[in-house]
Image (cartoon, helix red, strand yellow):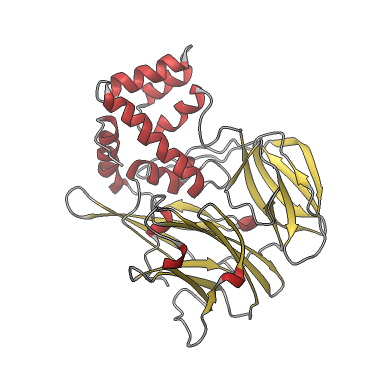
């Protein structure tokens, strides 16, 4: 599995999109898979989906160990959306689920890793956030204020839950060549403390980063970012300015942030600084903020996706050519303009509360590549 290329997971234009949610109660493991047909030229009958359970990333698939997900495992459908569920008893050695998606019509195979036990031996909680109206998990990495959800113990037990939040004041990632340290912001607790019982529909009233724990086990929980109703779109120009930090000078960004008329300052920057206006400026807004939206769905953790290390690299460089990962890191590979390769290594630094967070290994060697990529954005040469 460690040699499998999983870059398709970060390509929002891939023929299919796939995501999972996992819960665990002792040795009992339950997994939900959301499979979305993302192209008009494919249909569900083109695919076979199966899984096997392994002891590590370097463990090979064992003979007769594969289980196919057929219609018996299908629990819900939507428009080109198929949600599967399966459950099993794990042994102490088993640490990884490998999902295999085969496009039998085109003879293409894709492997997806689903860790059961991480390197830090964090536990997976027995409950998940569910949609309010359907009996399926909530798959988004963030919750908008106008969305309703509920807490469900997927193993049939009845639970009581506490939900406590802190202000979302996490800083934006610094460029890959900057080896300085960013001071962690202080945690500012949100006044409201939510209480919920099994299956109760809830709505959040304040944006922030929330920890959800079961009252009977306060040390085991899951986290979710709650955003305003517009995210990942922007209802204010003040918010639109923020992602420009990656492609502006310090002086330009300060001018944008302190302008009396933020809309005018934003439009002036785009029409004057981005290849001197015109259609190129319009394309810049279209493609730059499309990546912001994609990062929201791919990389949101305890802050907006574009603010994370992986989101920052994705924002500037786009879809990685290759991605390899194991229980400790992800390696992203991009094609360099000179015909070589640019490689970024992300270390898994936290699995707290079932949320994976990665940190980029920064190095001064990335400065030239970064400047070239930013210059391409500013000159209107980036094409999606």
Give the residue displayed 53% in from the left and 46% down from the top.
Answer: 300
Residue 179 in which image quadrant: top left
On screen, residue 266 above or below 148 = above
| Extreme residue toward the left, this view | 338
Residue at the (33%, 68%) spot, across then down:
106
- At a point 65% along the width and 56% down the height, the residue shown is 137
Whole-percent x and y of residue 231?
Answer: 55, 35
Position in image of residue 156 (x %, y %): 78, 65
Quadrant location, the N terminus: bottom left
The x, y position of residue 329, in whole percent, is 45, 61
Q: Is residue 107 left or right of residue 95?
A: left
Which residue is outermost to the bottom? 63
Which residue is at the far top?
Answer: 260
User: Is residue 376 in view from this perspective?
Assistant: yes
- Whether residue 181 is visible, yes or no, is no
Quadrant into which the C terminus falls? top left
Image x and y of residue 200, in percent: 79, 49
Between residue 3 and residue 134, name the one nearer to us. Answer: 134
């Amino acid at each position: 599995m460690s040699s499998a290329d999983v870059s398709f997971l970060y390509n929002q234009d891939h023929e299919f999109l796939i995501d999972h949610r996992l819960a665990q109660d002792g040795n009992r493991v339950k997994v939900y898979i959301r499979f979305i047909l993302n192209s008009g030229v494919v249909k569900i009958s083109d695919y076979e989906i199966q899984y096997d359970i392994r002891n590590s990333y370097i463990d090979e698939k064992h003979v007769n160990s594969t289980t196919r997900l057929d219609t018996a495992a299908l629990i819900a459908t939507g428009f080109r959306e198929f949600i599967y569920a399966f459950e099993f008893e794990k042994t102490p050695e088993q640490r990884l689920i490998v999902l295999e998606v085969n496009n039998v019509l085109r003879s293409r195979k894709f492997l997806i890793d689903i860790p059961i036990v991480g390197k830090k031996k964090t536990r997976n909680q027995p409950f998940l956030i569910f949609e309010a109206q359907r009996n399926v998990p909530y798959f988004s990495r963030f919750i908008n204020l106008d969305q309703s959800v509920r807490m469900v113990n997927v193993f049939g037990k009845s639970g009581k839950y506490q939900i406590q939040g802190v202000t979302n004041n996490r800083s934006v990632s610094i460029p890959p060549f900057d080896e300085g340290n960013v001071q962690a912001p202080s945690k500012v607790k949100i006044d409201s403390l939510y209480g919920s019982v099994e299956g109760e529909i809830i709505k959040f009233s304040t944006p922030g980063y929330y920890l959800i724990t079961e009252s009977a086990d306060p040390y085991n929980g899951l986290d979710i970012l709650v955003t305003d109703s517009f995210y990942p779109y922007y209802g204010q120009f003040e918010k639109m300015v923020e992602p420009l930090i990656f492609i502006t000078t310090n002086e330009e960004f300060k001018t944008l942030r302190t302008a009396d008329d933020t809309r005018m300052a934003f439009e002036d920057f785009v029409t004057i600084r981005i290849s001197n206006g015109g259609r190129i400026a319009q394309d810049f807004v279209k493609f730059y903020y499309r990546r912001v939206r994609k990062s929201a769905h791919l990389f949101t953790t305890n802050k907006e996706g574009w603010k994370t290390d992986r989101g920052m690299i994705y924002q500037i460089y786009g879809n990685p050519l290759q991605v390899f990962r194991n229980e400790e890191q992800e390696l992203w590979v991009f094609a360099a303009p000179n015909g070589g390769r640019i490689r970024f290594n992300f270390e898994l630094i936290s699995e707290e509360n079932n949320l994976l967070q990665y940190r980029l290994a920064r190095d001064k060697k990335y400065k030239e590549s970064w400047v070239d990529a930013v210059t391409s954005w500013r000159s209107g040469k980036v094409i999606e």
